[in-house]
Structure formats: C-alpha cells, structure tokens
Image (cartoon, helix red, strand yellow):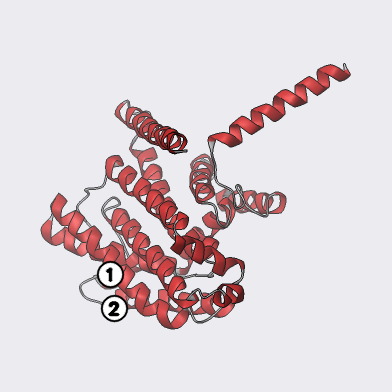
Amino acid sequence: MKKLFEARGMKKIFLLILTYGIVQLLISTNIINYYLQDYLAQICINIILALGLNLVTGFTGQFSLGHAGFMSIGAYTCAIINMNMNSTAGFLVGLFAGAVLAATVGIVVGLPTLRLKGDYLAIATLGMAEIIRIVFLNLKITNGAAGLSQIPQFVNWNWLFIFTMGTLIVISNFLKSSHGRACISIREDEIAAEAMGINTIKYKVISFVIGAFFAGIAGALYSSYFYFIKPDIGGFSKSIDILVIVVLGGMGSLSGSILSSILLAVISVFLSRFPEIRMIIYSLILVCIMIFRPQGLMGSKELSLNIFKNASKKLVNLFSVKKGRV
C-alpha cells in the first residue's frame, strides 16, 4: 500500500512539475504574451477563490455570498504594505498580513452568522461583504472611491503557481483529515452529524475561516499583479462570479473548480473578439451547460488518471462491439 501511495504521489508531483515547465516555456517563448498572462493570472486567482468557496459551500454546505469581501481585505492590506515597503519581503509580509486579517474577520463574522442556515446565511454574508466594501470606500488610507494605483508588481507566474498549488494541497489534505470528514458530514446531514457528537458550529467556522484565509491570499496576489484596486473588487458581482465557477465545476469537486476556472477564462478570450454580444453569448453558454449538466462538469467527483483509463476501456469495448455486429 505504501508503494502504491508513493507511486500516486510521484505521478502528481511529476504532473505539477510538467505543468509548471510547459507554461514557463510558453511564457519564455512569448506564445503566452503579456495579454494572455493577464488571463493566466486571473485563472490562478479565481482557482484560489473557488477552492476556498468550494470548501465552504460545496463540502460544508454553507451558502455564502460574501467571499469577495475577504478578497478585498487581502488586496487592500497587501497593497498598502507593498506601497510602503516596496520590496519582495514587503509583498510577502503584506500577503501574509492580508490573509491573516481576512481570516480574523472570518472568525468575527462566522461565529454569529454560521448559526443561520440556507438563505438567511447567504443574506448575512452578502451584508458582510457590503459592509467591508463601504468601509474601504470611506477610508482615507484606501483612497476612497478612487482606489489605490501604482501598486508595486511582485507577482509573476512563479508566485501564482506556488500559491495556487499550495492552496490545492492544503485544502485537499484538510478534506482527507478527520476535520474535513466532519465538514462533509455537516453537508450531508447536519442533524445526524450533531447526533454523532460533531460540533457543527465549530467546523462551520473552521471551513469559513480557511476559505477567508485563502480569499485573502487571492486578493493579495491580485493587488500585486494588476497595479490597481478599488472598493468594487469586493462587490456582489465578484462573489457571484466565484459562485458560478464553483457551481459550474461541481459542488464538492476541487478539480471541477480548476477546470471551470480555466474553461470560463478560455471562453472569455475567444469572446473578446465580439465585445457587443460577448456577455449574451457567455450567458447562453452557461445556461446551456447548466441545462445539460446541472451537477456541474465534475459533479462531486475528482479528476484522476483512472478516469482516462476507464474512458479508453469503454471506447475499446464500444469499437469491439461494433466490429462484432458488422
């Protein structure tokens, strides 16, 4: 069994190294130019946001609409520290401070609101995000509605890859632990979980805080890559965008969130040629996907090499049956 797990681990590490190397090669040869690098950064940031929200909504079953609020906390905290220190060390300090501050706000907000359920929780978290946006809109240190500009850029593909893969590894390992299984049990049946002695409020808050922590990291990466931020970064529309990624990929599927983030970015690149009808086509594509695949791209399953093996076996069997009929 140990050899089996070691083999699987080596395969995953090899795939990660291969992915990093291919993208780095495409960047160095300018196949992925500066324009496409912006989309690449957006993909990585959306993956981090979607993985955190999927932990809260997909795995723990808590409907949150305020995830972008935590992103704005990380973005502004990192930007302010970055603009004062203007160094790689300052970027790392700002990123860590933004993530910790977002997690702290997650604790403060989560303890009272996570006692609510369903639509009430969604309304409460939405209100929380709006409060955060209004606070940033009226603070002098955040430059109000004008936002912060000329933020030093320290984020590149290396940092994006490290934090995206780090987020995936941490959340994946958390879900495999006893704490992760407790969160999943709350999603399946909260009353039964309480009857089995699981402190449901505790694990709801834990998942909420972890999601807020990684949303803070995503915000810090955003502010350190795109130079400019404003209070709307934590608005309702951004929270909906993240929720769309989670639902499209599949509630309870980490690989689904990754695939849907990439898919939506690719669709946006192709539709950029048609700016007049871009949002109409984009919306129609989403509607069609949800009609024909309401459980999302991956459902609650995870993408693995076994899926491709099973698909190839089915194709072989299908062709052999057809040949037999002929």
Q: Nearer the viewer, residue 322 or 215?
A: 322
| CA distance separating discs 1 and 2 | 19 Å
Q: Which mark is residue 138?
A: 2
The amino acid at mark 2 is: Asn
The single residue placed furthest to the right in the displayed view is 325
Where 247 sits versus 66, above or below?
above
| Residue occupying image coordinates x 54% and y 63% | 184
| Residue occupying image coordinates x 35% and y 56% | 218
Regarding residue 206, the answer to whether it shows in the image is yes
Mark 1 surroundings: few (<14), some (14-19) or many (≥20) residues within 10 A: some
Where residue 312 sits in the image (x, y, percent)? 65, 27
Which residue carries the number 1 mark? Answer: 101
- Secondary structure at numbered mark 2: helix
Q: Nearer the viewer, residue 116 or 228?
A: 116
Q: Nearer the viewer, residue 167 or 92?
A: 167
Regarding residue 76, the answer to whether it shows in the image is no
Mark 2 surroundings: few (<14), some (14-19) or many (≥20) residues within 10 A: few
In the displayed structure image, the side of residue 199 where residue 234 appears, left or right: left
| Residue occupying image coordinates x 20% and y 55% | 92
* Disc on the earlier residue, 1 or 2: 1
The amino acid at mark 1 is: Leu
In the displayed structure image, the side of residue 103 where residue 282 appears, left or right: right
